[in-house]
Image: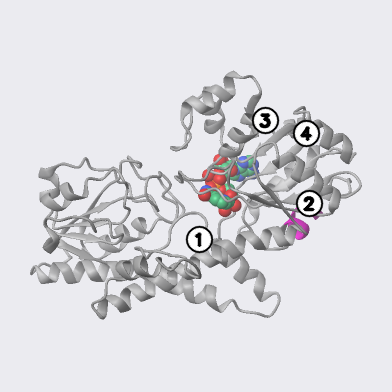
C-alpha cells in the first residue's frame, strides 16, 4: 500500500487535496501545482471557490495571474463538494484553529474536517494536519474521528502532522523554500508524508512523531511571543530611562552570535503568535503545569495598546489637548507591514480604545479599504485617502503598521503630531519635534 502511494506521488499521478484555501492552503496549492501535481482544493466558502475557478486571487500576495495560470493548466480544481475527498490520494488540512471566547483551543474546524474526511476515507489515503495546534491533536482528536470510518491507521491509511510556517508578505523565503517539518503517526505514514511534501517543498525535515512536529510549531511561536514581550517591556523601561530601545536592539544585533533581534510594537497581531502559545498553556494544565513564560508574555503583549494610548494622551496633553474630542488618524490596520491580514491586529484594539475615550478616529491602510465584521470587532470604517490637507486636520496621526508604501516624511511634514509605534520615522530629518514614540 505504501509503495503504491509513494510511486503515485513520485510519478506525479497522485491527487493532492487541500482542505481550507486561506492564507495557508492557497500557497500550498500554488507550490504543489508548480511541482507538477494535480491539486483539488476544498473550502466551505463558496465565494472563494468561485473566485479561484474564475482565476482570481483573494489573497493580496498571491497574484490573480498565478491563480489563472494554475487553473488554465487543467490540473487544478476547487470545490465545496466534500464527497470528492475520495479523489485525493493525500489530504492536507489547513483549516482555522482559533481560541474560544474563554481563550481555550477551538477544535471545531479540525473536528468537522476529520469527520467529513472519515465519510469518504479509503484505503491508501494519506491525511496530514497542517493547522497549528497543541501536541497530541493528531493522535487524540483527528485519529479517533478518522477511525470512525471503520478503517485503521497503519493498516488502511496514513496519518501525519506538518506545521505550516507561512509568513505572509515575506520576500526572502517562500512556501517552497521554508523547510517543512513532518511527523508521522508511524514510519510508513512519515515516508508517505515526506514523499508528498517533496513535490512542493525544497527541504523536508522528518521528526520522530506527530507530537514532535506539533511541538516544533508551538515552540517557534512561543519563542517569538516571549521575545516580543521582552522587548515590549524593555521599551517601556528604556523610555523612562531616556534610552532608545530601537537603537539598543540595533546595537545588540551586531553581535554575530547568541542574539536574535526582536522588535517592540503596539501589541501582538496575526493569526498565530497571539493565539498558538495558549494552545500549549491549555494542554499543559492536563499535565499539572502552568506555562508561566507564556502567561507573562501574554500579559505584557496584551497591555501594549493601553500603553500606546497613554502615550497618545500624554503627547496631546503636552499640546494642551484632551484625547476626548480629538481627531486621531490611525495609519495601518493590518497586523504587520505590507499585508492585508487584520486578524488580531493591535490597530483594531487601538481604534476601540481611542473611541472608548471619546476620540474621533479614522484610519488609512492601502491594503485594507474597509473593515469587515469580525468575531470581536465590527468597526464599520473605510480607509481615508491620505493627502496633505486631510493630515493637517487630525490632532494626531498614530502609526500602528509601518507599511513600506507610506511616505513618512510627507506624513510628518503635514501632521500636527505623529505617534510612532514602529520606529517608522527613524530616518527622517525634518519635523522630529512632532514625533513621539510609543
Ligand atoms: N496565516 C498564517 O500566516 C499561518 C501561518 C502558519 C500557520 N497557520 C495556521 O494554519 C491554519 C489555517 O490558517 P489560515 O491563516 O490559512 O486561515 P484562513 O482563515 O485564511 O483559511 C482557512 C480556510 O478554511 C476554510 N474552512 C473553514 N472551515 C472549513 C471546513 N470545515 N472545511 C473546509 N474549509 C474550511 C475557511 O473558509 C478558510 O478559507 C491555522 O491553524 C493557522 O494557525 C497560519
Q: Which mark is residue 273?
A: 1
Q: Categorize mark 3 by other alpha carbons within 10 Å: few (<14), some (14-19), many (20+).
A: many
Q: Earlier in the sequence, mark 2 or mark 1?
A: 2
**Which quarter of the image is occupied by the N terminus?**
top right
Question: Which percent across, then down, holds residue 87?
Answer: 77, 30
At numbered mark 4, what does the secondary structure look like: helix, strand or loop? helix
**Is label 1's Cβ within 8 Å of ligand 1?**
no
Q: In the rendered image, which residue does mark 4 sit on?
A: 9
Q: CA distance from mark 2 to mark 1?
A: 28 Å
Query: Which residue is under mark 2?
Result: 145
What is the CA distance from the residue labelled 4 to the residue labelled 3? 12 Å
Residue 14 lies in the magenta-colored region: no
For label 1, the crowd category at 10 Å Cα-Cα, with few meaning under 14, some 14 to 19 and many 20 or more, is many
Residue 348 location in percent, x, y?
35, 56
In the rendered structure, find residue 39 and report the number of the disc placed on it.
3
Residue at left 64%, top 41%? 201
Amino acid at each position: 500500500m505504501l509503495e503504491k502511494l509513494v510511486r503515485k506521488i513520485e510519478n506525479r499521478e497522485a491527487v493532492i487535496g487541500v482542505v481550507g484555501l486561506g492564507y495557508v492552503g492557497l500557497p500550498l496549492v500554488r507550490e504543489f501545482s508548480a511541482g507538477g501535481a494535480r491539486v483539488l482544493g476544498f473550502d466551505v466558502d463558496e465565494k472563494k471557490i468561485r473566485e479561484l475557478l474564475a482565476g482570481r486571487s483573494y489573497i493580496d500576495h498571491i497574484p490573480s495571474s498565478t491563480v489563472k495560470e494554475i487553473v488554465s493548466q487543467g490540473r487544478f480544481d476547487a470545490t465545496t463538494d466534500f464527497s470528492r475527498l475520495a479523489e485525493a490520494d493525500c489530504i492536507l488540512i489547513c483549516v482555522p484553529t482559533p481560541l474560544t471566547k474563554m481563550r481555550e483551543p477551538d477544535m471545531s474546524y479540525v473536528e468537522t474536517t476529520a469527520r467529513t474526511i472519515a465519510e469518504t476515507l479509503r484505503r491508501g489515503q494519506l491525511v496530514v494536519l497542517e493547522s497549528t495546534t497543541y501536541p497530541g491533536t493528531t493522535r487524540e482528536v483527528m485519529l479517533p474521528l478518522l477511525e470512525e470510518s471503520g478503517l485503521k491507521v497503519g493498516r488502511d491509511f496514513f496519518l501525519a502532522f506538518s506545521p505550516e510556517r507561512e509568513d505572509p508578505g515575506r520576500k526572502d523565503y517562500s512556501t517552497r523554500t521554508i523547510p517543512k517539518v513532518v511527523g508521522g503517526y508511524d514510519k510508513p505514514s512519515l515516508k508517505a508524508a515526506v514523499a508528498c511534501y517533496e513535490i512542493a517543498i525544497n527541504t523536508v525535515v522528518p521528526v520522530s512523531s506527530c507530537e514532535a512536529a506539533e511541538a516544533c510549531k508551538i515552540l517557534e511561536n512561543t519563542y517569538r511571543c516571549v521575545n516580543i514581550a521582552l522587548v515590549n517591556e524593555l521599551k517601556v523601561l528604556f523610555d523612562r530611562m531616556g534610552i532608545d530601545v530601537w537603537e539598543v536592539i540595533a546595537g545588540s544585533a551586531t553581535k554575530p552570535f547568541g542574539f536574535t533581534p526582536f522588535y517592540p510594537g503596539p501589541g501582538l497581531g496575526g493569526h498565530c503568535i497571539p493565539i498558538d502559545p495558549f494552545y500549549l498553556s491549555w494542554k499543559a494544565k492536563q499535565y499539572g503545569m502552568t506555562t508561566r513564560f507564556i502567561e507573562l508574555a501574554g500579559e505584557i503583549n496584551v497591555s501594549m495598546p493601553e500603553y500606546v494610548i497613554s502615550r497618545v494622551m500624554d503627547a496631546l496633553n503636552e499640546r494642551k489637548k484632551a484625547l476626548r474630542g480629538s481627531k486621531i488618524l490611525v495609519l495601518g490596520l493590518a497586523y504587520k507591514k505590507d499585508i492585508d491580514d487584520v486578524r488580531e491586529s493591535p490597530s483594531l484594539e487601538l481604534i476601540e480604545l481611542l473611541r472608548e475615550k471619546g476620540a474621533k478616529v479614522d484610519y488609512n491602510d492601502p491594503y485594507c479599504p474597509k473593515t469587515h465584521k469580525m468575531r470581536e470587532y465590527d468597526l464599520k470604517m473605510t480607509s481615508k485617502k491620505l493627502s496633505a490637507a486631510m493630515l493637517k486636520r487630525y490632532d494626531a496621526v498614530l502609526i500602528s503598521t509601518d507599511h513600506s508604501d507610506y511616505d513618512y516624511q510627507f506624513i510628518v511634514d503635514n501632521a500636527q503630531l505623529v505617534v510612532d509605534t514602529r520606529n517608522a520615522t527613524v530616518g527622517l530629518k525634518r519635523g522630529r519635534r512632532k514625533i513621539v514614540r510609543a
